[in-house]
Image (cartoon, coloured by chain):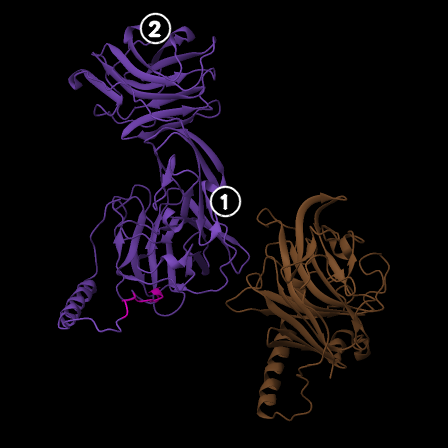
Chain colours: A purple, B brown
Amino acid sequence: MKIINRKYNYLKITLLLGLIFSISISCERELSEDVEFATFPDTAEVFIDGFSGGLEYLPFGGSKLDAFTVDSETKYDGSASMRFDVPNVGDPDGAFAGAIFPDNGGRDLSGFDALTFWAKASQAGTINEIGFGQDFGENKFLVTLPNLLLSTNWKKYTIPIPDASKLTIEKGMFWYAEGPENEVGYTFWIDELKYEKLGTIAQPQPAILNGVDDVEQTFIGNNITLTGTQTFNLESGINQTVIAAPSYFTFSSTDNDVARVSELGVVSIVGIGTAKITAILAGVKAKGSLTIESLGSFTGAPTPTRDPANVISIFSDAYTNVPVDFYNGFFAPFQTTLGGADLNINGDNIIQYTELNFVATEFKNPTVNASEMTHIHVDIQIQESIDPGDFITIELGDFGSNGAFGGNDDSSGRVTIASADLVSNQWISLDIPLADFTGLTSTSNLAQIFFISDATISTILVDNMYFYK
Amino acid sequence: MKKVMNKIKLEQMRSFITLSKSLLLAISLVVFLSCANDDKQTVVNFTELVMADEFDTDGAPDSSIWDYDIGNGFDGWGNNELQYYTDRADNISVQNGVLLITAKKEQFNSSSYTSARIITKGLFEQQYGRFEARIRIPYGQGMWPAFWLLGSDCDGVGENQESNWPDCGEIDIMEIQGQRPNIVYGAVHGPGYSGFDGNPIFKGYTLENDRFDTGFHVFGIEWGPDYINYYVDDILYNQITPADVSEVTGDSSDWVFNKPFYIVINLAVGGTFGGTPNAETVFPQSMLVDYVRVYKNN
């Protein structure tokens, strides 16, 4: 999200002070022998009755910029609280309320174990995301507590720090993002926002990949980003889970010649073979793992060479693509297909579908006028052996003159490629005349491309979907 | 430990009494400090060690001190407890200087959990003195660790529907609900104050900025002819006297703590005190006992 540069005046004062300070330091010629490395302030307070020293307010782009105010009437304690006005749906000032509160000087939070605050709301509400560690920089130690339930009474909330020893120079003191509840805005208040050493944050149960032991087949050059959580048992007996940025974890791979993990949690596939990725958070082994089965080098689909002037591209790195709503609509209840445009192998974006029965790519905002085009091109790779009954059907859907699904003006047509024309583990380049899609009465408002196998084929890669003439 | 029904409710009911009592204690402590020779003060410290198990020998607990309660008793040892107690090394063993009582989730003789309970009945019984143990507890709803005493004449407690409990007396030195891992309860049960026929006499102590499941703590009582003092580490947090019994039953002669008692240490699963384990309760988990020591009343 974009940064809106909006700061309060006293920040300038802080900057000025900093300047004076650095000037006075520059008078000293050399470091004394018993110099100690500077440590950052360990200020606990974020907002008690006003901003703590160094704290800034930066709302998210697209959010209601004035959602946050200091309220001296409603407060839990002292003279003021933080008030957040979540907009209604359709509010021209912004679709949601959200901001970060950084201290760009950095603070040493390593002596604390939680961010705590008192909160209440004008109605029962669920804050979508709230936490700390967001500074509009690397967000290396981002912590997110999703779906925090608020009531209309003041209550104390605790966001545990996954591993405080990492937070010696933390800038992101607090952040939140919340949209309307049932399309209606409301107000919530936060007070006595501060870091604490509670001593009762215990029994860590870290996890990666939601605690699941996952297996993934992939290729050299692919990158996979891991996610993790930390769960602590609080004094109240409640297990509180937060989303912890990958940098809180120490990852290891059983074979660094197959896969290695960066401190940002990105798994790079570098060789052929199998490697298991596991993680540790603050000395505790995380539940869950990722076993990489690297199939070796990946041969991308042939790079298209047609003149862009003659192409309307839906999905290809060779062309500018039209806006696409999704590469997998997850149509319930009959669709089993998983996956979508998830693979990026050495910069080559590829769609991977697994457990295929049928799946649609949809591009209806706006629909595509391919009336001057003559063919559709698509590259498919089937990642399994081909059995006699296997097939792939491609269906095109046109939404008709109203440009929307339904309305008795839609049409569609199918072309089926039988098993005899399919090969395993190689790119199959299809160039099908649009005229072959019997039943497709218009190509002026195309909006859907389906792949259908009725589960005869379950795993396919797709690349370079485009119409051309 | 036994039949401590609806303790939370009871605690609320008794909060006034407890509050006034703790105020009284605070006042008397202040008095004590300002006048060290006050012979009415019964805050004492005993020093003559008469029994100690430091759990320094790996294997089963010392059979010259400890015996086992096996099975599920009557109606879950009278408390709807869910575990089956065994003497298997899986559930109880001494390792690296610590006694481990381990609660496991497993089907065993029609129970869904196993654990262990050891007693010194007939092996070590004493009237008065300091009884203490250094313990680290497990956590989570349904974990019910306890270190307690029963009168040496207690017979069939929790094993048979008919027994001489509560008349035979019970002193609970430590009971913790796994879902509130920083609150310990100390109690006495006896005739007219068992939890069925009158409230037990008890008090909770909250450990500030710490928990009982993240490190070892010493739970102890100092017990004399007309008082039981409750300690956590070096903190005296309650004193129970015949006057407290009289407050419930109207008769201070219902004080049944002038005779030898034996020690019980167990880790129950489920039951009326802490409730049933939930999906988040971690199994297996162990209660760790570093030592049990008993001093003479001198």
Q: Which residues are magenta?
A: A36-48
Give yes or no for residue B239 being in the magenta stretch: no
> Which residue is at the front of the view, A428 or B34?
A428
> Which residue is at the front of the view, A363 or A223?
A223
**Reading the chain from its start, which is encountered first: label 2 or label 1?**
1
Which of the 4 quarters of the picture holds residue A174?
bottom left
> Which residue is at the front of the view, A181 or B260?
B260
Instruction: Report if the CB atoms under discs 2 and 1 are less than 8 Å apart.
Output: no
Tell me how far mark 2 sits from mark 1, CA to CA: 52 Å
Residue at which label 1 appears:
A287
Badge 1: residue crowd in 10 Å (few <14, some 14–19, many ≥20): some
At a point 36% along the width and 45% down the height, the residue shown is: A180
**Residue B159 in picture, x, y percent from top left:** 82, 56
Query: Is residue B13 something that shows in the picture?
Result: no
Image position of B69 with respect to A252: above or below: below
The quarter of the rendered structure image containing the C terminus of chain A is top left
Query: Is residue B109 something that shows in the picture?
Result: yes
Badge 2: residue crowd in 10 Å (few <14, some 14–19, many ≥20): some
Q: Amino acid at mark 2?
A: Thr
Magenta stretch: helix, strand or loop mostly: loop
The quarter of the rendered structure image containing the N terminus of chain A is top left
Residue at which label 2 appears:
A438
Specify the subunit that label 2 lies on: A
Specify the subunit that label 1 lies on: A
**Residue B85 in picture, x, y percent from top left:** 74, 53
User: Left or right: where does residue A331 sit relative to residue B50?
Assistant: left
